[in-house]
Amino acid sequence: MSSRVAIYDTTLRDGTQGEGISFSGTGKLRVAERLDAFGVDYIEGGYAASNPKDMAFFRDVKRLNLKHAKVAAFGSTRRAKIAVGEDPGVLAMMEADTPVVTFFGKSWKLHVRDILRTTPEENVAMIADTVRYFKERGKEVIYDAEHFFDGFKDDPEYAISTLRAAAEAGADMLVPCDTNGGTLPHEVHEIIRDLTNTFDTPFGIHTHNDSELGVANSLEAIRAGAVHVQGTINGFGERCGNANLVSIIPNLLLKMKRDCLKDGLDSLKQLRDVSSFVNELSNQRPWAKAAFVGDSAFAHKAGMHVDGIRKNPHSFEHIEPEKVGNKRRILISELSGASNVFLKAVEMNLQVDKSSPEVKDILRELERLEKEGYEFEAAEASFKLLIQKVLKAHRPFFGLEGYRVIVEKNAENEDCRSEATVKLRVNDEIEHTVAEGDGPVNALDGALRKALTRFFPQIADVFLTDFRVRILDPEEHTAAKTRVLIESSDGKQSWSTVGVSENLLEASWEALVDSVEYKMFIDEQKTLQDGV
């Protein structure tokens, strides 16, 4: 690989400015540990002068014994007409006691005039004074030139003079920022190319995604000579977000052949897990269509595409999904062909020939069910059970004798009371249980689990993570057919199931039964594979 690009992660600072993004104090420390293990070079821990949580992070992160990443404290230049050694923000960065300080200064005369309300000369002095102050105290200094590209377009000579002030004062890295996210890739390339040819100090890049060009602009800056890139995991950040490191890193490693992680391609295999970890710690639902790491990133639906993938994966995949810790998925829908069904059967270790009558039987049953409103794209567990049933390879783990659900409300109590009774036959035994719940589906779910747990203890580990209802024919009003999609997990893996009926409870029951049966099915398969 050619020259290295340093990865500067600002998820814990700039990322938290995104709407709905927040980390607990402990969460920030866990993210820092994960980023360090992943192999990023810098972790920006927070704005030193902004809040006690960030200062607590700088104190506590020292106990983590990070193996590779350097922690950076963030702040701004000294304020106008205040001595650098007396500025509270500058002192807070020193108090953070990090090996690296990153601070921003103004590059755009509009901001100097309207926001700082000082003179262009004083702004340049503020930048130089702040760099010099930290360098004299042994810090690695990264200078973020805020709004640089807008400032350059407005007055290139002045924008460059602000960078020169930082460079001459001893800054270790100059980072032009596309703070408003409005610059185009060809503009970024031209400007960074000219800057790297003018200065001896190395350059980085910091972009935002307001024009959906954050990743493209970052890559163009690197192609033009930048050796340091700032961004966030999953593109978290204010407005439309920051440049997404989850997309930048694999493009650098796999396509531009630029080393950028401590352990290179070995680290890259952690990419999906890192993305999921940060989503989980910030309480964000993963985006299925996220490049490289999303559930849909390597999902194939059209029959011809699936046939091509079966013959040569490179025909419809730009990289091997395993390189970023992801996996290929074959979707099942009305667009499916024999190849889709065949590959699903292979996933299940079933011996089926692509041209066999059984595959045609599965396709016919799929077509029949989809006409009734079933959809298996987002319910792969139900489809796998369907294959088992059509191939007559399915062994029911239990049989339904009956269920009843009561919803009661009276004038004295504002809350509704839901109670479900379930009677099941397991082997030759009848199990009759009752459970209450927040609603009728919750009560039915509780009664089903209660009935099965004695026979199948692993059911106690299963819990619902999502429950969605869609009305299929709204013109039928309250008699409309409904489709219920349930996502379940046992803490180690997740699966989705579907049910369809004019009766919401019956649709829910179908999805619930598939959910618990699939858990028992995969446990049984694992036992057989392990030879137990």
Image (cartoon, rainbow, N blue to C red):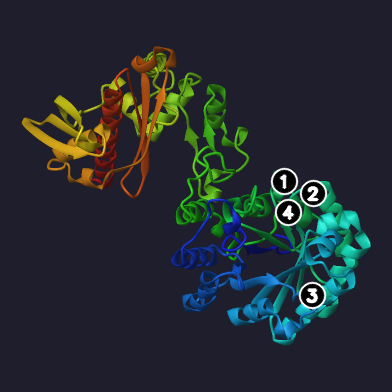
In this view, 451 is above or below 326:
above
Q: Amino acid at mark 2?
A: Thr
In the rendered image, which residue does mark 4 sit on? Answer: 218
Residue 190 % position (x, y): 87, 53
Q: Nearer the viewer, residue 344 or 59?
A: 59
Q: Nearer the viewer, residue 109 or 212?
A: 109
Picture quarter with the N terminus: bottom right
In the rendered image, which residue does mark 2 sit on? Answer: 183
Q: Secondary structure at mark 4?
A: helix
In whole angstroms, how far apart are the C-alphas of marks 4 and 2? 11 Å
Q: Residue at x 13, y 36 (%)?
A: 434
In this view, 73 is above or below 365:
below
In the rendered image, which residue does mark 1 sit on? Answer: 213
In the rendered image, which residue does mark 3 sit on? Answer: 80
Q: Amino acid at mark 1?
A: Leu
Q: Label 4 crowding class (10 Å Cα cut-off): few <14, some 14-19, many 20+?
A: many
Residue 289 % position (x, y): 56, 39
